[in-house]
Image (spheres, rainbow, N blue to C red):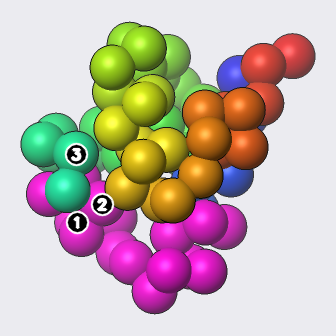
Amino acid sequence: MKTRIKELRARHDMTQEDLARKVGVRRETIVYLEKGKYNPSLKLAHDVAKALKSTIDEVFIFD
């Protein structure tokens, strides 16, 4: 799975730490999500998308 988290974070001038705090996870989780090494739960995917003011489909690319 690919993500646009890094791109969307940059658009909102948000660090990995900022996003992690907003969604209630550790920064490492955001790193793994950005690298596509971690498949999030539906709740986490929703929380990340909401924090980035996007939809799940815009943030996560399922191939």
Task: Kindly identify which numbered label has been placed on residue 23.
Answer: 3
The quarter of the displayed image where residue 14 is located:
bottom left
Marks 1 & 3, CB-CB < 8 Å contact: no
Looking at the rendering, the stretch of residues picked out in magenta corresponds to 7-21
Real-space Cα distance between discs 2 and 1?
Answer: 5 Å
Residue 53 visible in the displayed image: yes
Q: Are marks 2 and 1 in contact (CB under 8 Å)?
A: yes
So how many labels did they put on this image? Answer: 3
The structure residue drawn at horizontal position 16% and vertical position 40%, both measured from the top left corner, is: 25
> What residue would you read off at disc 1?
17
- On the image, numbered disc 2 is attached to which residue? 19
Measured as percent of width and height from the top left, residue 9 is found at: 51, 69
Residue at (46% x, 86% y) in the render? 13
Q: Left of 62 or right of it: where is 50?
A: left
User: Residue 46's mark?
Assistant: none
The single residue placed furthest to the bottom in the displayed view is 13
Question: Which residue occupies 73% across, 43% down?
Answer: 58
